Image: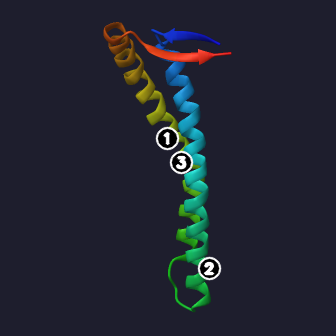
Amino acid sequence: MAQQTITRIGVLSLAKMLAVLYAFLGLLLGGILSLFSVMGAALGAASGGDSGGVVAMLFGVGAVIVLPIVYGCIGFIGGLILAPVYNLVANVMGGLEIEMS
């Protein structure tokens, strides 16, 4: 098993990777938020109150659409910031050692 050292990371490569990972995280969290929003709207309607059930359901559906986009943008910007920082630190510290088989 050979040990390799990562001494440089491509800026756009990391930015795209983090954008996709964060978008999936946003989709997961948006789905959970949507589920709770719809459940809250249903409980409000079942109790007989006018608790804005339509607004809550629209908020839940919007979360599934908006959160992946927002999280994806945050991940992309984070990758643009983190890759140069890693490259700078790797030049000083020697990089990240990984074991490959």
Q: Helix, strand, or loop for circle 3?
A: helix
Coordinates of residue 80 in the picture (x, y in percent): 42, 21
Q: Earlier in the sequence, mark 1 or mark 2?
A: 2
Q: Amino acid at mark 3?
A: Val
- On the rendered structure, is 88 left or right of 43? left
Coordinates of residue 55 in the picture (x, y in percent): 53, 69
Q: How many marks?
A: 3
Q: Helix, strand, or loop for circle 2?
A: helix
> Between marks 1 and 3, how big is the CA–CA gap?
9 Å
The residue that mark 1 highlights is 71
Image quadrant for the C terminus?
top right
Coordinates of residue 47 in the picture (x, y in percent): 57, 91
Q: 4 and 43: which one is in front?
A: 4
Q: Amino acid at mark 2?
A: Ala
Residue 17 numbered tag:
none
The residue that mark 3 highlights is 66
The residue that mark 2 highlights is 42
Instruction: Report crowding for label 1: few under 14, some 14 to 19, many 20 or more residues within 10 A (C-alpha).
Output: many
Coordinates of residue 77 in the picture (x, y in percent): 42, 28
Which of the 4 quarters of the picture holds residue 95? top left
> Between marks 1 and 2, how big is the CA–CA gap?
28 Å
Q: Helix, strand, or loop for circle 1?
A: helix
Q: Amino acid at mark 1?
A: Tyr
Q: Say which residue appears at 56% left-offset and 11% top-offset.
A: 3
- On the rendered structure, is 91 left or right of 54? left
Q: 23 and 62: which one is in front?
A: 23
